[in-house]
Amino acid sequence: MQSLNPTQRRIHQAAFRLFAEKGTLQVNILDLAQEAGVARGTVYSNIESMETLFEAVASQLAKEMHERVSKSFNSLSDPAQRLANGIRFFIRRAHEDSQWGAFIHKFAMSNASLREMFSSQATTDLLSGLSSGRYRFQQEQLLSILTMISSSVLGSIFLVLEGHKTWRESGSDTAELVLRALGVPLEEAKALATVELPALPLID
Amino acid sequence: MQSLNPTQRRIHQAAFRLFAEKGTLQVNILDLAQEAGVARGTVYSNIESMETLFEAVASQLAKEMHERVSKSFNSLSDPAQRLANGIRFFIRRAHEDSQWGAFIHKFAMSNASLREMFSSQATTDLLSGLSSGRYRFQQEQLLSILTMISSSVLGSIFLVLEGHKTWRESGSDTAELVLRALGVPLEEAKALATVELPALPLID
DNA sequence: CACGAATTGAACACGAGTGTTCAATCAAGG
DNA sequence: CCTTGATTGAACACTCGTGTTCAATTCGTG
């Protein structure tokens, strides 16, 4: 999974593209070989199975995004601002890289690594925001809230991918709605959701 | 599509079950025939294609749910109460009939009839609630809001299907969060989301 | 009870994808 | 320039699903 040789890297990247546009089940070895610019036999000698390939691609994507978002949070202490930015990062990125967006949209609900990426990021901030009085909700609602947040982000990504909304509008709207749902006063929610969004940091 | 003979009805019902549990692409004619308790040849002489069969099943399901929810709204004038109940109807039904829930969860985002079911129901109430001052949002946010609502309901259905939450909790939480996002005051949102939920009316 | 329509289930010819093998070819470092 | 390891692409045997046909049968209705 770690330390891929160049051929394996090409195969993984090709797999990412194909999974994003066709879904797991429509990708066959022949397509994959062609997309990677490699012979069929090479694919078989470089991957174990489609399953493990998909798992590797998904968890790599989750890891990369998680790290970049975390890094950007170093400079922000307000949990509400972090949440709003996090939401908008996802939506902006889906717009800037529509394959990335399609991948997330297709698999975020069903894949454990991707679900984990969403929820681990948000949980700590949700709890700290609650105890600092920034949010108003009951702790038993945490799971419902996490679900609402990730679902809304996915829905919003869908909207952007389909071209029904710009990422700016959709991202700010979604962040604002989520903050409101968490009990942040209306004007404040709007303000937090519309500040200038910084660039997503690169890693290593 | 209308007026199915008994054999066609059996096939459609079997298709519903299979689509719900295996997804569109994993259903083949043989499975379908067996599930319907019918010979392979009979399936071929009773459906045009898998595509049209799926479309028929989905739109039938959308129509049925839409009518029942609409009927239940006759006795409610408050748009916020209607919305809260509508959300909870979906979530409760997904719990009571997990195949129905699985079907919705799998296809609500990708199928036009199902998307329509969600949005047409909500749009008018959203707008009337806005003009009556029950909600606070900007009209340009309507699409983002519809997306947030339907995504949240789907996420919540997932939670219930997976057994992470009861339908009661999940339904009330989701309804409450949505109302808050729309600008309904916190205590009022909670109250509206936790009233006794009536039975969903039958049709014809 | 007899007739026509629907259903049955087996048979056939296909196409598509899989997993595996292997001799030929290539590329790069010693 | 030679060796070694990876890559190539064609070939093989196999499975599964499709779409279609059709004689035999069942079933419902008049």
Image: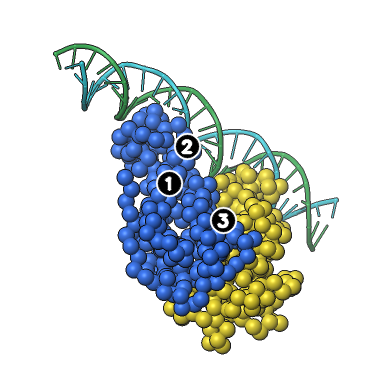
Chain colours: A blue, B yellow, C cyan, D green
Judge from the rendering whether residue B22 lies leftward or rightward of residue A25; answer left or right.
right
| Residue A109: x %, y % from top left | 53, 53
SS class, disc 3: helix
Question: Which tag is nearer the camera, tag 1 or tag 3?
Answer: 1
> What residue is pinned by disc 1?
A63
Write down the chain letter for disc 3. Answer: B
CA distance separating discs 2 and 1:
16 Å
Residue at x 33% of width, y 54% of height: A201
For residue A24, above or below residue B165:
above
Mark 2 to mark 3: distance in Å? Answer: 23 Å
| Front-lying residue, A145 or B202 | A145
Name the disc covering residue B106, or none. 3
Residue, disc 2: A52
On the picture, is A127 further left or further right than B14?
Answer: left
User: Distance between the Cα atoms at labels 1 and 3?
Assistant: 26 Å
The quarter of the displayed image where residue B97 is located? bottom right
The amino acid on which the numbered mark 3 sits, given as a three-letter code, is Lys
Residue at the (44%, 48%) spot, across then down: A62
